[in-house]
Image: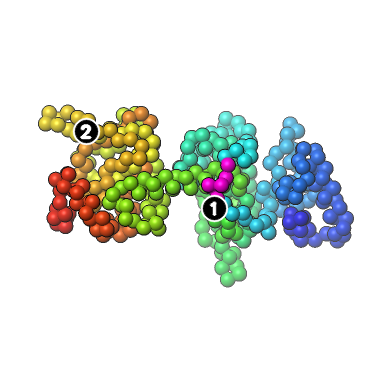
């Protein structure tokens, strides 16, 4: 009914009764043809063939040349009154629905991988999760003046640009004003899906192009859930650091969001003895070996660190060169916390450390340092 109301308001038929009859007959026939039960929830995601929609042609064009149905056109139509559902990752099962897969050629897959490689939201995904996301993304070609999203509409898809120029408009004092543009790279549309809010801007194609779209359900099920779990893991890692245990919940959340996961292969050098200290690290997966040069300039292993351990934490306050080198053993993932990012979020590191100064001084003593050394810097 929500879709029908929207289409009726857009099309403004002279005979509403005949229009409604044709609409729902086509909807029923379409559902039967593709084996879709005519429930209200499914009806919202399926438009009848043969009915003209605002901003789109006759939906009979959904059939490709080989007779296989393509993604329904209503992915790009704007539903005005869909109520965004609450999202709780803890309550969602991984097996609620079968995975969505849109077959792609090798060329398409290569282009898609290139388009998403720098998307920050995908950085937290495991390889298997990323493959699921790529499988679920579908391609759309755009023409000049094509509206990809409109400010105020409900969020339906997340978009990644393959090629093309896309202008960004925001309504200011009742007038759409251009505030920026994407030029052959970038992504947009995630905020409405993440926070259940209307679209904050209008995106219009300024040239012919190609974009990749990920539907709302898959985005929330995989991308948001992965981000949620990663943040929870990072918060737990931060809670294990004595000098950070007195951060309040809000501070810990901010620092957790600033952590960046970095994968390493067997034997990779993570930090080198004598180098400047810029970050501290938390081991998410794998094992790390801590080594130090002896009097003969040979490296001697001091300790092995496992998942949940951390190293380089004194870099946050001493800014002294690294006292040892750390190597990955096997495939290892560590979360990096940049010193500047930490201080930008929480202010001076020393001010934070004063909350747990007792534990902190003990750690300094084990390394032959003291508060006097630090105060003099």
Q: Nearer the viewer, mark 1 or mark 2?
A: 2
The residue identified by callout 2 is 302
Residue furthest to the bottom = 173
Element assignment for label 1: helix
Residue 265, quarter of picture: top left
> Residue at coordinates 24% horizontally, 58% vertically from top-left?
354
Name the mark on residue 194.
1
Residue 165 seen in the figure: no
Residue numbers of the magenta segment: 88-93
Q: Earlier in the sequence, mark 1 or mark 2?
A: 1
Residue 375 falls inside the magenta stretch: no
Where is residue 38? Give x, y as percent. Answer: 78, 45
Residue 266 seen in the figure: yes
Query: Is 110 located above or below residue 319 in the figure?
Result: above
Separation of disc 1 and disc 2 at Cα?
44 Å
Query: Is 98 located above or below residue 248 in the figure?
Result: above
């Amino acid at each position: 009914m929500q879709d029908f109301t929207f289409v009726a308001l857009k099309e403004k038929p002279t005979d509403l009764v005949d229009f409604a009859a044709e609409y729902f007959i086509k909807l029923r026939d379409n559902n039967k043809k593709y084996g879709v039960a005519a429930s209200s929830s499914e009806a919202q995601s399926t438009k009848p063939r043969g009915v003209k929609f605002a901003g789109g042609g006759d939906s009979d064009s959904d059939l490709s040349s080989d007779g296989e149905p393509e993604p329904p056109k209503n992915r790009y139509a704007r539903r005005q009154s869909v109520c965004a559902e609450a999202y709780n990752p803890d309550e969602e099962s991984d097996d609620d629905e079968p995975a969505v897969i849109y077959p792609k050629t090798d060329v398409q897959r290569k282009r898609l991988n290139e388009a998403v490689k720098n998307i920050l939201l995908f950085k937290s995904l495991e390889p298997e999760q990323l493959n699921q996301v790529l499988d679920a993304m579908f391609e759309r070609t755009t023409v000049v003046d094509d509206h990809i999203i409109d400010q105020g509409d409900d969020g339906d898809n997340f978009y990644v640009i393959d090629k093309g120029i896309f202008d960004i408009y925001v309504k200011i004092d009742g007038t759409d004003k251009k505030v920026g543009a994407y030029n052959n790279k970038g992504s947009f549309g995630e905020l409405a899906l993440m926070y259940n809010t209307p679209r904050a801007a209008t995106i219009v194609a300024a040239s012919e192009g190609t974009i990749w779209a990920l539907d709302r359900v898959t985005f929330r099920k995989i991308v948001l859930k992965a981000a949620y779990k990663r943040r929870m893991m990072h918060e737990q890692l931060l809670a294990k650091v004595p000098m950070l245990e007195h951060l309040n919940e809000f501070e810990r959340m901010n620092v957790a969001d600033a952590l960046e996961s970095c994968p390493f292969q067997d034997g990779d050098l993570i930090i080198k003895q004598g180098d400047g200290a810029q970050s501290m690290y938390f081991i998410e997966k794998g094992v790390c070996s801590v080594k130090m040069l002896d009097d003969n300039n040979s490296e001697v292993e001091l300790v092995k660190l496992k998942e949940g351990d951390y190293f380089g934490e004194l870099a946050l306050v001493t800014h002294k060169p690294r006292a040892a080198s750390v190597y990955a053993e096997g495939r290892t993932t560590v979360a990096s916390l940049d010193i500047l990012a930490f201080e930008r979020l929480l202010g001076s590191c020393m001010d934070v450390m004063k909350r747990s100064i007792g534990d902190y001084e003990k750690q300094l003593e084990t390394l032959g340092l003291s508060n006097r050394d630090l105060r003099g810097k």
